[in-house]
Image (spheres, helix red, strand yellow):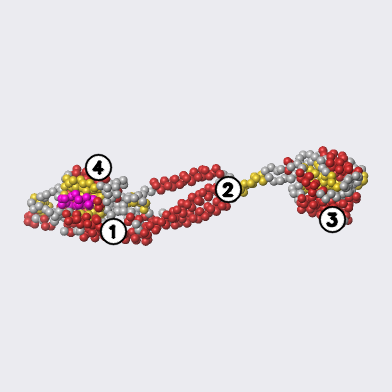
Amino acid sequence: MDLIFAWLLIPGAIALAGALVLVVRRRRTGEEAVPVAHGDRLASLPSYQRLVRRQRLWLTVVVLSALVLAGALLFAAARPALTSSQRPEQRSRDIILCLDTSGSMSRADAAIVDVFASMVRDFRGERIGMTIFDASGVQVFPLTDDYSYIEDQLARARDAFDRRSADPAFFEGTREGRGTSLIGDGLASCVQNFPRLDTERRSRSVIFSTDNYLAGTPVFALPEAADLAKAKGVRVFALNPADFGPRTTNEEALELRAAAESTGGQYFPLRSTTAARSIIDQIQASEATATQGSARGLVADRPDVPLGVALVAGAFLALGLWRVRS
Amino acid sequence: MTSLVTKVKTKMFIFAHRRARTMLDGEFGSVFRGRSLDFDDLRAYVPGDEVRDIDWKATARVGSPLVKRYAAVRKQTVLLLADTGRNMAAVSRGGEPKKEIVLMALGVVGYLAHRHGDQVSLVSGDASSSETVPPRGGEGHLELILRRVDDAVGLDAGPSDLTAQLAHVARTVARRSLMFIVADEAAVGEEDASLLRRLAAQHEILWFTVRDAELAGAAAPRRSYDVADGGYLLSLLAEGGEVAEDYRRLVEERSSRRARILTGLGIVEAHADSVEDVLPALFRLLERHRRAR
């Protein structure tokens, strides 16, 4: 509990003390008291003594409740408030899920979406977008931190991958390029999908799921796309469903790994059970500096207690003034 | 500084416009029982003179009533007795300082005594001490007496004690005299009663009560304090109801007790609430004293 205008207490207390002094002075000097003799004529009466006791009691009530009232109002005027500083965690990490939907991936895609969905459940604050590509990249949904929307979209993607015929519109626009499985182009379009790529410094990652089986002539070869990503500060985490480990031998997998690692990212065979978790850890460990939002002070006024006390004291004051005879 | 005696004389002069001033003299002259038989001269009758002093033969000759004047064989002494404790600095029922009323009463009686050719003495004091101004004649002496009282009475004076003054008179005054006691509404106790009994046997006593301010009811001052201990009195609590009733009963009881004791001793009492009251009250007092005999 803090007082916003704590300085107000000092002039307030001085004013209160001054008012008290004035009241006492006025009592002393005000209406001239008359000297009388044989006051025992009145003072010795039991009925008078009873009334005096009652008068004293109510006077005490009046004085005390006036003091409490003034004090409580002064305290309320000093604005008691709960202050707290909040450091809103602005996770300025952007993640684009980049999914190869070419024929060679068709069996693995649903599982990959599952992995994505499990990752999304662990993210909080990050913005996530999704792009699918075959011959050309298509944005499924842009970067957003609306997780329920993301989950809806991933569920839709999963359904679409389960039965391609059920939702052909999902794949609309992915076959516009020359050939299929243009891996480099796909990565490049995913990288380009980050907004304000050149102006805003954020942690950007692409989770890039592909088997790297190229069938056509891409504009960007995979290393070129990786270079672009590196130049733009985007890290690529590759997920390869066609790598059956433990030792990666085939050429495509090696190329993919090299591409991913050249951007500062990592390569995971999809079979690896820890893949989803470690990708998330890696991404979340990145660039903590950029994630801290500026601290914001929160002030919540709490005048209820002093004002409640003032109300009660006011009630007692009114009662006392009514009972005191002057 | 105006003379206190002059002030008294002025008041008496104003009073004389309403009643013949000589009437007071006549009343005062009749107070004394012991008169000489030496015939002095005749003078015109004024109301208040003893009827038995009228010289009927001379009256028949002249056609208007004449009274015989006797030369006093011995000088009478008028003993003024006043409490000069701080009670007398308090306020009277009429709202004036009681001291003013005391001074007026002492002054009038002293002046009448002076005109009558008597000597005036004073016994005054408070609980701590009593003092006596020995009997002497003359206006200057009266002025001294009044000034003594005027100076002694104040809020810083000692506590009031009329009993001490009565005891002082009983102890020190041997000569028979006319005692004029100025008191307030103090309760008259057993000790006072026995002292008065003792004094009444020796002296002629006149009792003059200066009534104290009311402490209850609508006439009570709004803010007051007791001069005895400085304690504030909340008269506003006693404007009515049970307290006012109790107060009225207590005051009634005290004054009836005082009246009973005084009447039992053959002492005549009068009371005044303000300076204006003093002369009529004194007139009544002298009148009643004469009748009481």
Mark 4 or mark 1: whose residue is earlier in sequence: 4
Task: Indicate the amino acid at tag 3.
Answer: Asp
Residue A176 visible in the shown view:
no
Q: Quadrant of residue B192?
A: bottom left
Q: Quadrant of residue B207?
A: bottom left
Q: Position of residue A324 (x, y in %)?
A: 43, 55
**Residue assigned mark 1:** B254
In depth, the one of A86 and A274 nearer the eye is A274
Which type of secondary structure does the marked residue at label 4 adopt?
loop
Residue type (three-letter) at the residue carrying disc 4: Thr
Question: Callout 2: few (<14), some (14-19), or many (20+) C-alpha neighbours within 10 Å?
Answer: many
Chain for disc number 3: A
- Residue A80's label in the rendered image is 2
Q: Which residue is mark 3?
A: A159
CA gap between label 3 and label 1 equals 113 Å
Q: Secondary structure at mark 1?
A: helix
Residue A161 part of the magenta-drawn span: no
Q: Secondary structure at mark 2?
A: strand
Q: Give the letter of the chain under mark 1.
A: B
